[in-house]
Amino acid sequence: MIEFRSVTKQFPDGTVAVENFDLVIPPRKTTVLVGSSGCGKTTLLRMINRMIDPTSGAILIDGEDTSSLEPVKLRRRIGYVMQNSGLLPHRKVIDNVATVPVLNGVAKRDARAHALELLDTVGLDRSLADKYPRQLSGGQQQRVGVARGLAADPNILLMDEPFGAVDPIVRAELQQETIRLQEGLGKTVVFVTHDIDEAFLLGHQVVILQKGGHIAQVGTPAEILAEPADDFVASFVGADKGKRKLRIEKVGGRDIVVDEAGTPTGVLQS
Ligand SMILES: Nc1ncnc2c1ncn2[C@@H]1O[C@H](COP(=O)(O)OP(=O)(O)OP(=O)(O)O)[C@@H](O)[C@H]1O
């Protein structure tokens, strides 16, 4: 469990990115922080692994105050996946994945063997192991980024807009992989996005943020859709525009779900 207790972050230039933020992030589930640009999502995420330290308040991981933990050690046991994959350009794929375990003291040979398994886990062919990041597609690079995030077998995986730069089809694939991985490995995933559809797809718990890291609403996707807390949330999730009003039509004896514009979105399973 990760707990934010009245956390504030003011940057040296006076910007208050996050103010009095309280949140409990349950273990082995995906929590998505969603909101428009500049609302404080990345700052919140980076405070979990102490890439950024709060100005006041506390962040606890399994009851332990992170301010008492050594940042470098903490970072090595929390996976971090960022938007542009963050791979080291001059290292082969396999070494990008094996870097953190080697820093943690795992023998290079063992770390590389494990890295190959992780390529399988994220759906990459092992033949890519000896390539350099620039020789991979954007989607493949993101998968390597996820493999690297998982390499130290962390309980917590932080993902900062990891699929923002890939095309919609690859993005949909990567989203499904993330769901599969989270369920299969039972990680606590904290995921940042500005895309409410992505938030609803991935999040067991969705946190809708406004500027200053102010929480507009926390809940399951169903709870938020059923009862938006206010007009801001209703507008953010598209409920006010009828975007998410779905109806069922019978087509060829099957129940098809269509949105308000009449576009089919799926088949209802009996
Ligand atoms: N190092 C910094 N110094 C000063 N202000 C900063 C710094 N980092 C972030 N900020 C400011 O803090 C606020 C929150 O930034 P943050 O990056 O957390 O937002 P975000 O929701 O992740 O945005 P985006 O979706 O655009 O990445 C913004 O106003 C930003 O300009």
Image: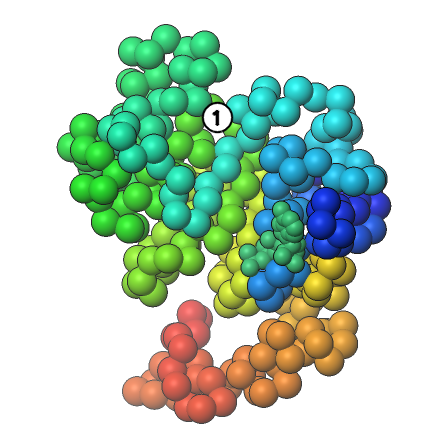
Q: Residue furthest bottom?
A: 261
Q: Residue furthest front?
A: 13
**Vertical order, 179 against 47 (above or below):** below
Residue sitting at x 69%, y 44%: 25
Residue bearing mark 1: 153
Say which element carries label 1: loop
In the image, 34: left or right of 142?
Answer: right
Residue sitting at x 61%, y 35%: 51
Amino acid type, callout 1: Asp
Image quarter for residue 163?
Answer: bottom left
Q: Where in the figure is residue 169, as x and y percent of width and height?
A: 30, 63
Q: Where in the figure is residue 161, as x and y percent of width and height?
A: 48, 53
Q: Where in the figure is residue 237, as x and y percent of width and height?
A: 60, 74
Q: Quadrant of ligand 1?
A: bottom right
In the image, 12: left or right of 74?
Answer: right
Q: Residues within 10 Å of mark 1 (few under 14, many from 20)?
A: some
